[in-house]
Image (cartoon, helix red, strand yellow):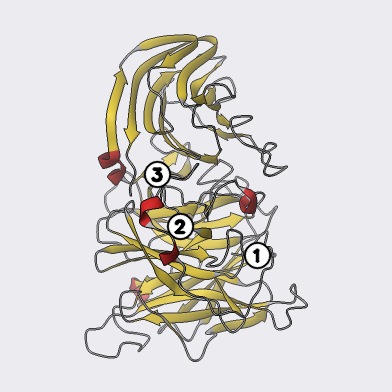
Amino acid sequence: MFSAMKCLFSGLLIAVAFGAASQDNLYKEIYRPQFHFTPIKNWMNDPNGLVYFEGKYHLFYQYNPFGNVWGLMSWGHAVSKDLLHWEHLPLAIREENGIMIFSGSAVRDENNTSGFAEKPGQVPMVAIYSGHFIPDTSKRDDYQQAQYIAFSLDRGRTWKKYDHNPVLDIHKKDFRDPKVFWYAPEKKWVMAVVWPLEHIVQFYSSPDLKKWVHLSDFGPAGDTHDIWECTDLLEVPVRGQTGKTKWVLFNSQQVTMQYFVGSFDGTQFKNENPGSKIYRPDWGPDYYAGITYNQLPAGELPVLVGWANNWTYANDIPTFPWKSAMALPRRLSLQIVNDEWILFQQPVTALKALRRAAWESKSTIVNGKKMIPVKSQQCDIELTIHPPSNGLAGLRLATGKAKPFVIGYDAANHKLFIDRSGAGKESFNASFGKLSKYEAPLTLHNGQLKLDVFFDNSIVEVFANEGEVVMTAQFFPEKTNNGMELFSEGASSEITGLRVWTIQSVL
């Protein structure tokens, strides 16, 4: 990933950074999310190398070991048994010899197609990433990008870069973010990789992760207003139809994401949704570079992880000693809605084990506003509401002396919206306050809106109607602004279900 770069290059050797912060002081800082993944300290952006290996979910990510802003890109590393409780591991793949380690993927090479195994039964973990090289640091825009590999024979704890890198070099300036997966029908590896400026995803195949052959191109299509990057291609199950799947292609556009749904025959992807329409996995301001896990256990729904930040102000958000968080891991499925394939997303069920101290109200009428007798900035709220047909209704978070964070539904225009205007600190970046209100098209079912809202100190994620629409946003409220209320404007609303849980920290 490369957008909004602030070029901070160095020939220094990169040391392990994680040991410097004491576990005793973690998760107590202002704005630190308590159940979203954050690095112990320093800058983080795109999730990379998501792979399931020997009973654990591996999360690699773009990481600066030396600072709290973008730069010196290497891969950080953590592992988890449930996608929520993470063990921080030493730096995985480091920038060196002038080559920055940009985004990519990782796989279990179970058949040792790469030949990296050194003894029988050994399964290499192979990372495929974009190497970003600047021949002359006085000309930082004169860079080259190609695809590199590295391998680990000890469950991702130590890494060796391939001696004959790069493995795919078309001598192009912008050519990045490889997502590699095993295509079982033809027993080959497939890579999706992006030409950002041309809005093209290219597909390549390989028998051994070392030699790559071009298959086909997809694009331009959908949203082409900004560069494309951070692509992914995978099969996603269709809800309620056992054994049926469709292929989903993701990519990111500078500060947002889109997806396409269709077919993939091992060579070419074909979009089956209307080509004139844009489909987003997240309609909020703070969701980017989402990719999915490779090689999950049989029967598990795909898992998507995205970066909960925005390049417009990412370097400036008021967090220290860490910067950036990952959004909650999401399980994916598909469903036909109005003759279109729609992606449905649900937070991983392990979150339910973190719930504490439930408060419940089964039925009530709201006209104006109604306080909820719970104060928290670390909670999960399930709300079922029948909004007025020509008014606005929803939920306000972080109420108190400042403006609240608003989650609402505009029934007349069939729009779900969020508004963080004035709900917390904004002065750290001139653009943050201007990027406050976001909306998404959403048609109610039988006049009913279901919301599942996760509030985690400085991040809000909204899952509407079982994840048909999702919105993610950061904001930075004062700790004393911890109330919440229901509202209905224009007419009354009926609340038919409301439950609030506080959520314990994952530390």
Type of the residue with mark 1:
Pro
Determine contact: label 1, label 3, CB under 8 Å. Answer: no
Determine contact: label 2, label 1, CB under 8 Å. Answer: no
Type of the residue with mark 2:
Pro
**Residue at (67%, 54%) from the top-left corner?**
224
Residue 387 makes an appearance in the image: no
Q: How many marks?
A: 3
Res. 39 mark: 2
Task: From the viewer's perspective, tell me whether residue 299 is left or right of residue 308.
Answer: left
Q: Nearer the viewer, mark 2 or mark 1?
A: 2
**Residue at (52%, 85%) from the top-left corner?**
167
Q: Residues within 10 Å of mark 3 (few under 14, many from 20)?
A: many
Helix, strand or loop for disc 2: loop
Residue tagged 3: 34
Task: From the viewer's perspective, tell me whether residue 133 is left or right of residue 271.
Answer: right
Type of the residue with mark 3:
Gln
Determine contact: label 3, label 2, CB under 8 Å. Answer: no
Helix, strand or loop for disc 1: loop
Q: Nearer the viewer, mark 1 or mark 3?
A: 3
247 or 227: nearer the viewer? 227
N-term mark: 3 or 2: 3
Task: From the viewer's perspective, tell me whether residue 108 is left or right of residue 441.
Answer: left
Res. 196 mark: 1
459 or 479: nearer the viewer? 479
